[in-house]
Amino acid sequence: MSSIFGQLPDGTAIQRVFLDSGAGLRAEVLTYGGLLRGLSLDTARGRTELVLSLPTLDAYLHDPAYLGVLVGRFGNRIAGAAFSVDGQRYAVSANEGANHLHGGALGFGRRVWSVQAQSERSLQLRYDSPAGEEGYPGNVQVSAEFSVHGRTLELQFAAQTDAPTPLNLTHHPYFNLAGDAGVAAAAQWLRVPADRYLPVADAALLPTGEVAAVAGTPFDFRNPRAIADKDGAAEPQLRLSGGYDHCLVLAAPRDCSAILYSPHSGVAMRIASAMPALQLYEGHWLDRQHPGLGRGVCLEPQGYPDAPNQPGFPDTILRPGQVYRHRIEYRFAEVGAHAEWAAVEAALAD
């Protein structure tokens, strides 16, 4: 089912498409930014909203926080808004000071996606990014398919190009599984199987190039704990960022990318992706950007930030003849409030 959510200033109609798994999970996706505007689960407490959302299209047009969007061409940051590919230097748009963030001023999250296929439980979107858009080389054709089944939301990206270009697609929903803006998002418990992380150089949050061990730092989520359970005042990295906004390097092999659990609602989520890293952002800038909205936690599976400028990081260049694929699975379960962690893991297990 779909309806018109609003119109852009040029008159372009933006659709919202509703997906229903038939097992209690429902999603709402906009053709603007391919953004996930709604995600809710039937629970014993009633319908529980799992992600933060805004009320109108105009609010999304002026949103600086990337609420719910599909991120591209390059998720996270590129230093100096420039990079080289095969000896050729390219300048991309600088939309965060001197640096490039989440694809630029009009990245994929601010573009209109076309509907390629639609059913009660799935939606396939497409966006064709022309060479030179935001300064990137190559024409890129990208598809993003949302599907719901059981209590799982799945997002599958696929992309091709006709010239070498950086590509690092991710997804930017803000999760507060409590379903209540009055409950702190940092009260959620988190486990991330990451034994390393990427320290940042300064408040611009660009990686230094070092890959550091999480042991003995607030970035160690290998054992589950509340996100708020940290000593930020004693951690220089957290002072630089004002809170968690760092890239965690996932272990291999691993059982998931992350597990998040709300002791308040009893809802748990397991994220699975083959990407090597996960950006953890605790949403602390939302207090200024959207007062009264509350906070949500972003858990963004992706390649390494600034990889085109960091020869020691895994390659993020897509080349002609290759097909970029990235699948993210969000699995939900109702465990019960204040459950033991073993019960959380069991409810989300395959």
Image (cartoon, helix red, strand yellow):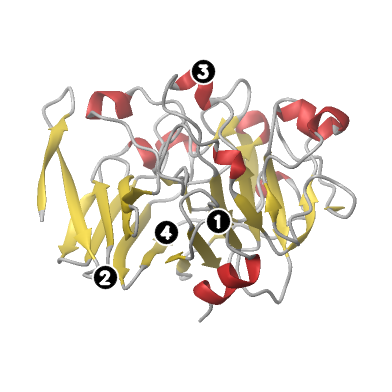
From the top left corner, tell me how far across and down residue 180 is, in percent.
Answer: 42, 38
Per the model, the C-alpha gap separating discs 3 and 4 is 41 Å
Left or right of 345: which side holds 291?
left
Q: Residues within 10 Å of mark 2 (few under 14, many from 20)?
A: few
Q: Nearer the viewer, residue 3 or 83?
A: 3
Q: Secondary structure at mark 4?
A: loop
Per the model, the C-alpha gap separating discs 1 and 4 is 42 Å
Q: Secondary structure at mark 3?
A: helix
Q: Which residue is painted at 85% across and 34% down in the image? A: 235
Q: Which residue is mark 2?
A: 23
Left or right of 32: which side holds 12?
left
In the image, residue 250 above or below residue 173:
below
Indicate the quadrant where residue 191 lies: bottom right
Q: Are marks 1 and 4 in contact (CB under 8 Å)?
A: no
- Residue 162, numbered circle: 4
Q: Which residue is mark 1?
A: 261
- Residue 122, numbered circle: none
Give the label, 3 or 2, closer to the camera.
2
